[in-house]
Image: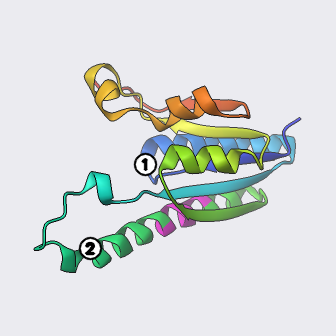
Amino acid sequence: MYWSLLLPTDGSEAAEAGLQEGLRLAKALKARVAFLYALEPLGPKLLLGPETLPYYRELVEDLRREGLAALDQATRMAEELTVPFEAHLLEGRAAEVILKEAEKHDLIVMGTHGRTGLDRLLLGSVAQEAVRKSPKPVLLVPHRRTSP
């Protein structure tokens, strides 16, 4: 039986599909949910030159606000369905944060972006890594597929 579900979100439509399905499942099972937003480090994704350093702190704060907004959306959804929840904004690479948090829960429910072809190979997939490495079961919820 699943008593505690981990529902990662990045604020996207795909993540919302995962949240909706996870919350419906939690309601049916009388389970608790934990929402998770991973605040990814900027280093490898952003080439910083001296001219961009003054904006770094502002960018980090914008990303933090984005994460809090995604968690706020998730908590409103849980409140509407009267599903008990907790919400966490944690720093780190998304897949690593999800896998670490998974140890505390019975099931991970997450949406997939439905990328195919070259996009999938170049960008990698948080969901794919979670499925491959998770110590707990992972329920993937598809969102619409993008063209290859």
The kind of residue on which mark 1 rests is Ser
Residue 39, image x and y in percent?
46, 60
Quick check: 96 left or right of 82?
left
Judge whether residue 70 is colored magenta: yes
Q: CA distance from mark 1 to mark 2?
A: 23 Å
Secondary element under disc 2, as helix, strand or loop, is helix
Residue shown at the point (70%, 55%) measured from the top left:
34
The span picked out in magenta is: 68-74
Q: Report x, y in % for residue 143.
A: 46, 33
Q: Residue at x 77, y 50 (%)?
A: 104
Q: Assign a secondary structure to mark 1.
A: loop
* Residue picked out by circle 2: 56
| Camera-side mark, 1 or 2 | 2
From the viewer's perspective, is residue 114 above or below residue 24? above
Above or below: residue 1 compared with residue 79: above
Which circle marks residue 12 in the picture? 1
Identify the residue at image location x=71%, y=63%. 86
Which of the pair 33/79 is nearer the observer?
33
Q: Percent position (x, y) of residue 93?
A: 47, 51
- Image quadrant holding the C terminus, namely top left
